[in-house]
Amino acid sequence: MKLTPHHRVGQNVCKLRTKKILTQEQLAEKADISRRYLQRIESGEKNPTVDVLTKLRRALNCTWNDLFEDVS
């Protein structure tokens, strides 16, 4: 099964979060989003807006390329 772009982004967010040893709750707080919304992004249920991706990128201190790695 081919993953959709928002599934890939969600996987990348999860990978970056765990690499930085952050819980979903900690990252959600840093990004000023709800933990449930972050959970849905990571699972691919939600397709985050550019505003939310910007918050996540800043909270994770990563590049846009990190968020969109392997997204096609």
Image: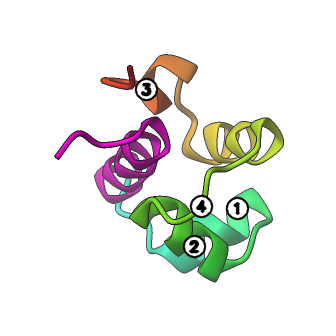
For label 1, the residue is 30
For label 4, the residue is 46
* Horizontal arrangement in the rendering, residue 36 relative to residue 72 (left or right): right
Percent position of residue 34, x then y:
72, 77
**Residue depth check, mark 1 versus mark 3: number of the one nearer the observer:** 3
For label 3, the residue is 66
Sequence-earlier tag: 1 or 3: 1
Disc 4 from disc 3: Cα separation? 19 Å
**Placement of 66 over or under 61, stated as above or below:** above
- Label 3 is placed on what type of residue? Asp
Q: What element carries label 1?
A: helix
Percent position of residue 8, x then y:
37, 41
Q: Nearer the viewer, residue 15 or 49?
A: 49
* Horizontal arrangement in the rendering, residue 12 relative to residue 32 (left or right): left
Percent position of residue 29, x then y:
71, 71
Q: Quadrant of residue 69?
A: top left
